[in-house]
């Protein structure tokens, strides 16, 4: 039995969506109306804003749940939101590696990266909402839980043993189909996604980069959405924690892109998180009477990520690959 059935809390989803759209409009229409290079300070401020908003929402959800359901359930609800937020925010770090490489591959000038990421995040929000709705419907069947759990375990193991994949947008199916129907220019013309050459409109590298980022995010969503469902079966918590993490991804990119190569071991922490949440779905929840303690889950996930970050700093990488070169160009 869900605490926040959609039929009763449709108004909350509507208000939350209006809030998200307002913040995005404020971002693009006021603070970033003119194309410019996003500085580390600006990115750090916006990252802080998004984290504070997420924590404020968590506190508000906690206070509301106390009134509606009592202290014990309210505490669990708040911890589930926080755990889901940490999972999604952590898994988003892997997106940053992709962002760095894609922008370098297409030669996107630094002052236009915010525009590409803005629309990329907007598309990601739409796709995540669709994935969450589908996941919520599928989770009604108990056997789906085991399928999702097994998938996360396999994905985590593959991530643990895989190397950093090369970025080859030209081989992406979506990009190849798009090029068959729309002519593409290799020149970046201001901040526009389309450029008219003669009487024919051509897509610019900004649009191709955007399409590739959207396709990549769909792949990431296949991992991240089931991972949050391993923490809670409350669709409202899955939706809001996921959206808050996605909203903070753009500013996190501008803050970390220059140093992301230093966290070369974080993929092992992310792999461990995926395996752990997969085990929760296929075994641990049943072993603990239907629900693995949420406090333990939060502590384990934070420990995995924290240890991988610490290990990256203690044992720095001696390689200077493509990501390292791209990161050094973030302010160009």
Image (cartoon, rainbow, N blue to C red):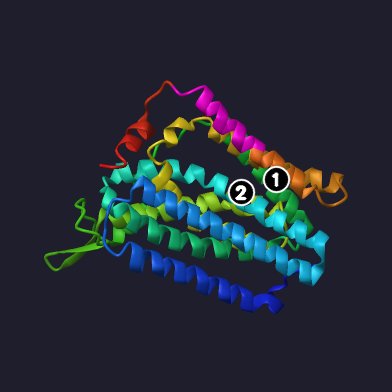
Q: Residue at x 54, y 54 (%)?
A: 51
Mark 2 touching mark 1, by CB under 8 A? yes
Report the magenta residues as a range: 303-317
Asked whether residue 215 appears in the rendered view, the answer is no
- 264 left or right of 280 in image: left
Q: Which residue is mark 1?
A: 298
Q: Which residue is mark 2?
A: 86
Q: Residue at x 76, y 57 (%)?
A: 75
Q: Residues within 10 Å of mark 1 (few under 14, many from 20)?
A: some
Q: Earlier in the sequence, mark 2 or mark 1?
A: 2
SS majority, magenta? helix
| Quarter occupied by the N terminus | bottom right
- Front position in the image: 149 or 170: 149
- Front position in the image: 173 or 91: 91
| Quarter occupied by the C terminus | top left
Asked whether residue 225 appears in the rendered view, the answer is yes
Q: Residue at x 53, y 49 (%)?
A: 220
Residue 180 rendering spot, x and y as whole percentages? 30, 58
- 121 left or right of 329 in image: right
Secondary element type, mark 2: helix
Q: CA distance from mark 2 to mark 1?
A: 8 Å
Residue 113 rendering spot, x and y as whole percentages? 32, 52
């Amino acid at each position: 039995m869900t605490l926040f059935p959609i039929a009763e809390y449709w108004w909350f989803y509507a208000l939350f969506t209006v809030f998200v759209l307002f913040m995005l409009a404020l971002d693009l229409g006021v603070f970033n109306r003119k194309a410019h290079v996003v500085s580390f300070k600006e990115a750090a401020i916006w990252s802080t804003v998004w984290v504070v908003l997420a924590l404020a929402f968590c506190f508000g959800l906690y206070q509301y749940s106390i009134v509606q359901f009592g202290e014990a359930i309210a505490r669990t609800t708040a911890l589930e939101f926080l755990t889901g937020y940490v999972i999604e925010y952590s898994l988003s770090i892997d997106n940053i590696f992709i962002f760095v490489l894609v922008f370098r591959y297409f030669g996107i000038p630094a002052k236009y990266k915010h525009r590409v990421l803005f629309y990329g995040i907007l598309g990601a929000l739409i796709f995540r909402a669709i994935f969450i709705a589908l996941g919520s419907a599928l989770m009604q069947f108990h056997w789906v839980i085991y399928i999702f759990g097994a998938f996360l375990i396999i994905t985590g193991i593959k991530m643990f043993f895989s190397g950093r994949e090369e970025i080859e947008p030209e081989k992406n199916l979506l990009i190849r189909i798009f090029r068959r129907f729309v002519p593409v220019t290799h020149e970046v013309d201001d901040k526009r996604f389309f450029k008219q050459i003669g009487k024919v409109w051509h897509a610019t590298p900004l649009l191709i980069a955007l399409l590739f980022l959207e396709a990549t995010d769909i792949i990431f969503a296949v991992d991240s959405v089931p991972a949050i469902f391993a923490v809670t079966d409350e669709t409202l918590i899955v939706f809001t924690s996921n959206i808050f993490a996605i909203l903070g991804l753009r500013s996190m990119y501008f803050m970390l892109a220059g140093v992301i190569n230093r966290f070369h071991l974080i993929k092992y922490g992310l792999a461990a998180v995926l395996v752990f949440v997969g085990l929760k779905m296929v075994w641990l929840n049943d072993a603990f009477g239907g629900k693995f303690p949420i406090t333990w889950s939060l502590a384990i996930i934070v420990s995995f990520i924290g240890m991988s970050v610490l290990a990256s700093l203690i044992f720095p990488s001696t390689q200077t690959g493509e990501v390292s070169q791209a990161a050094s160009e973030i302010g160009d």
